[in-house]
Amino acid sequence: MKSDIHPKWYPNATVGCACGNTFTVGSSKPSMQIDICSKCHPFYTGEMRFIDTMGRVERFQVKQKKAADTTYVSKKKKKQQKKQDDQKTPKSLKEMLMGLK
């Protein structure tokens, strides 16, 4: 086995969460900072709340609101509308002349 290829092991590395909770684990780093832990994660706490560190939830909610505000016309309705428009316009010169009478 080669010597000095493995990182140093810290058996009592401290982990600090954004909620203020701290605990110790074994790690190759002496200390770490995390965004969420078992004390503040919605799955473990049973609370329904959004955990967002980069603004993704807000961007998604804005997109959802925009989508709900805009009017959606389905392909079927567009096809029916086009069919009605085609029926109104004359197809040939004969139909145009028949319409003048």
Image (cartoon, rainbow, N blue to C red):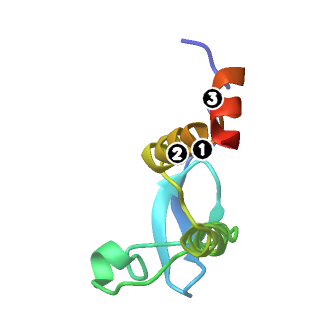
Q: Secondary structure at mark 3?
A: helix
Residue drawn at 54 percent across, 60 percent down: 72
Residue at the image point whose x is 54% and y is 52% from the top: 27
Residue at the (31%, 73%) spot, across then down: 43
Where residue 12 appears, x then y in whole percent?
Answer: 51, 64
- C-alpha span from label 2 to label 3: 16 Å
Q: Which three-letter amino acid code belongs to the residue tagged 2? A: Gln
- Asked whether the residues under the numbered discs 1 and 2 touch, taking CB atoms below 8 Å apart as contact, a structural biologist would say yes
Residue identified by numbered label 3: 95
Residue where numbered disc 1 is placed: 88
- 59 lies left or right of 40: right
At horizontal 51% and vertical 39% (from top left) the residue drawn is 83
Instruction: Inspect this view and state whether residue 92 appears.
Output: no
Q: How many marks?
A: 3
Q: Residue furthest front?
A: 101
> Mark on residue 64?
none
Q: Amino acid at mark 3?
A: Glu
Residue 6: percent from the left, percent from the top?
61, 30
Residue 62 in which image quadrant = bottom right
Residue 43, above or below 31 = below
**Mark 2 or 3: the one toward you:** 3
> In this view, which residue lies farthest toward the top?
1
Picture coordinates of residue 84 (x, y %)?
Answer: 52, 45
Label number found at residue 84: 2
Which of the pair 36/70 is nearer the observer?
70
In the foreground, 41 or 24: 41
